[in-house]
Image (cartoon, coloured by chain):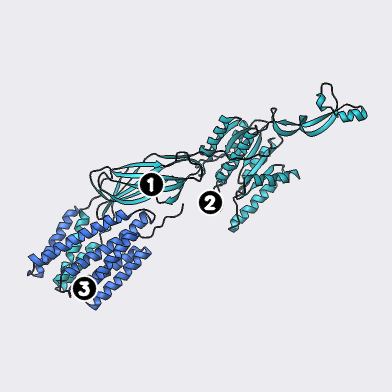
Chain colours: A blue, B cyan
């Protein structure tokens, strides 16, 4: 039996790289952030082509770091938010590409699986980002940072509760 | 039908984003950076909320051909239908291709998402091979929307691919002169009526007039009778070497057992075509015996045994082999005047021992040996030399040897071998 081609799935990988480019653009405010994000993207690219999860994880972490560091300099709060979503999407889709490639291989028809997964990841991220953005713009425009800290603490508690 | 559910741990890292952004934003008093934690928390919450869906699927597998010949490409279609109430957002299906068959084209795997009631199909081609091949359980993995948890399961849907090839066509197989008392077409060394000249002898009262040498009577007045070589029917038993040692493959990864079965089937068909009785035995851990016989029913029986008998399967048998028991069992069944066509790749010395023992016990043995050795590695080259040495040793005790290189046609090998016997 010819060994199936177990390289990462193409569709998810392409989407991951697109998301990575978006995240990199969102981080483009100061030199440090750009350097961090570009390095991260390079590692992500390497991981997605060479089939290594560690490179994908490290790359996504650096990319996320770039987005977070760049966030401070942005005039519009929405851009880093969607940059963060793009980072998570890039990281997850690259991992998913490796995963699908490993389990099913290139020969199998996996387009629907990949599209639905990418859709779900994008939907969750966009919902979270929109909620965060609305919260920031409307309700908590003038609140102190400490309030936000407590809010985050509350959401972590919620997360913990859902885990049970 | 045992399900296992496990977390894929794929979203563990997303909390790092939440905490990292929160710490950075709080530390440097940057609300915009702090806000990014919301995204991390959102993903983590959604991932936590997911649970592996129940796999309620209906499977239906169809083959496009019922009775394929070996080498034919058979298209397998597996239809997967979501029979549950919930959408399966991440469904991975791997069809259980029989271990003994190869996928020729396409992939037996599928990744899809299925709303309730919808179905998807996996389509691929497999190459049919001799024997009965049962499909194994279909492996299914289903994940939730974000892929946090995975449920793995197996579903069995019974399908079998049965491939019973026709007996190989072979014009004739040179049998040895040992024969039975039945009239037939094998020329023996016994003097009597026939076609081929044997000897002359003094006329005895009652000899047929047609066989009196009248030319001699006219010349000398002595009455002599011409004897011909008698033609009788032979009884052949094809003994296939199916011991674990004979389960070797050549450079193209074709099994010696498959070559042996092809050769045995050719010998059987040639024997039946020339009205010689032919039987079949497997000399290996799994026993198979068909007494010599003739006729259409017998042909079908041989054909099915060669294709389907577990003893002839191309996979290495797990049972332990007891050589002495097997040999005694074979001897008990072999008719006294039968000749044996022993089919073996001859890659170990015990195969030669068997051939020799049969010959010394009075069975005329023809050793038909498909050559699966090559010279790609020093070990294989050595195996080739040893095999040649065994062939020479077999010839030395008057065993007829047909050294068949499966790359060439069997009749060519037979012709080459019989030229050697005539010398």
- The picture places residue B190, in percent across and down from the top left corner, at 76, 31
Q: Position of residue A3 (x, y in %)?
A: 44, 55
SS for tag 3?
Answer: helix
Asked if one can make out residue B92 in the rendered structure from this viewpoint, the answer is yes
How many C-alpha atoms fall within 10 Å of the one at disc 2: few (<14), some, or many (≥20)?
few
Q: Nearer the viewer, residue A160 or A132?
A: A132
Q: Chain of mark 2?
A: B
Residue farthest to the right? Answer: B220
Q: Which residue is mark 3?
A: A69
Q: Quadrant of the C terminus of chain B?
A: top right
Q: Quadrant of residue A75?
A: bottom left
Quarter of the rendering containing residue A122: bottom left
The residue at which mark 2 appears reads as B253
What residue would you read off at disc 1? B95
Residue B84 x %, y %: 25, 43
- Between residues B83 and B6, which one lies in front from this camera angle? B83
User: Does residue B11 appear to the left or right of B341 in the view shown?
Assistant: left
């Amino acid at each position: 039996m010819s060994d199936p081609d177990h390289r990462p799935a193409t569709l998810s990988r392409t989407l991951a790289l697109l998301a990575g480019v978006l995240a990199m653009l969102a981080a483009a405010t100061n030199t440090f952030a750009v350097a961090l994000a570009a390095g991260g993207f390079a590692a992500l690219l390497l991981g997605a082509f060479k089939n290594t999860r560690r490179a994908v994880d490290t790359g996504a972490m650096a990319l996320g770091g770039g987005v977070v560091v760049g966030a401070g300099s942005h005039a519009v709060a929405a851009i880093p938010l969607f940059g963060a979503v793009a980072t998570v999407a890039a990281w997850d889709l690259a991992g998913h590409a490796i995963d699908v490639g490993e389990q099913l291989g290139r020969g199998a028809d996996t387009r629907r699986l990949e599209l639905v997964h990418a859709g779900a990841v994008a939907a969750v991220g966009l919902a979270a980002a929109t909620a965060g953005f609305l919260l920031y713009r409307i309700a908590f425009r003038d609140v102190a940072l400490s309030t936000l800290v407590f809010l985050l603490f509350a959401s972590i508690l919620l997360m913990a509760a859902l885990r049970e | 039908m045992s399900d296992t559910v496990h977390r894929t741990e794929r979203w563990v890292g997303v909390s790092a984003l939440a905490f990292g952004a929160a710490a950075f934003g709080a530390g440097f008093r940057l609300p915009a950076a702090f806000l990014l934690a919301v995204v991390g928390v959102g993903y983590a919450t959604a991932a936590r909320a997911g649970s592996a869906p129940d796999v309620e699927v209906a499977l239906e597998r169809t083959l496009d051909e019922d009775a394929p010949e070996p080498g034919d490409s058979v298209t397998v279609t597996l239809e997967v239908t979501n029979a549950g109430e919930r959408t399966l957002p991440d469904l991975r299906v791997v069809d259980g291709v029989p271990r003994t068959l190869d996928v020729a084209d396409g992939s037996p795997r599928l990744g899809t998402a299925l709303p309730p009631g919808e179905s998807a199909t996996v389509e691929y081609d497999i190459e049919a091979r001799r024997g009965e091949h049962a499909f194994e359980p279909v492996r299914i993995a289903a994940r939730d929307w974000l892929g946090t948890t995975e449920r793995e399961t197996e579903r069995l849907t019974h399908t079998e691919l049965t491939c019973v090839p026709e007996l190989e066509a072979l014009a004739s197989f040179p049998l040895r002169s040992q024969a039975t008392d039945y009239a037939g077409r094998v020329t023996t060394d016994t003097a009597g009526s026939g076609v081929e000249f044997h000897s002359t002898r003094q006329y005895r009262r009652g000899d047929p007039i047609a066989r009196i040498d009248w030319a001699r009577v006219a010349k000398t007045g002595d009455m002599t009778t011409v004897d011909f070589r008698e033609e009788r029917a032979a009884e052949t038993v094809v003994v296939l070497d199916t011991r674990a040692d004979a389960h070797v493959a050549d450079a193209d990864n074709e099994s010696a057992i498959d070559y042996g079965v092809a050769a045995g089937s050719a010998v059987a068909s040639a024997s039946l075509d020339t009205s010689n009785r032919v039987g079949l035995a497997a000399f290996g851990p799994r026993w198979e015996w068909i007494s010599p016989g003739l006729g259409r029913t017998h042909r079908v029986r041989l054909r099915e045994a060669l294709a389907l008998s577990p003893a002839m399967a191309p996979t290495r048998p797990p049972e332990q082999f007891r050589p002495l028991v097997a040999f005694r069992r074979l001897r008990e069944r072999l008719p006294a005047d039968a000749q044996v066509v022993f089919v073996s790749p001859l890659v170990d010395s015990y195969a030669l021992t068997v051939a020799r023992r049969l010959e010394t016990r009075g069975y005329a043995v023809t050793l038909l040996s498909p050559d699966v050795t090559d010279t790609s590695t020093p070990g294989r080259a050595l195996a080739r030399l040893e095999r040649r040495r065994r062939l020479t040793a077999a010839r030395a005790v008057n065993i007829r040897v047909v050294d068949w290189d499966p790359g060439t046609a069997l009749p060519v090998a037979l012709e080459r071998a019989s030229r050697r016997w005539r010398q």
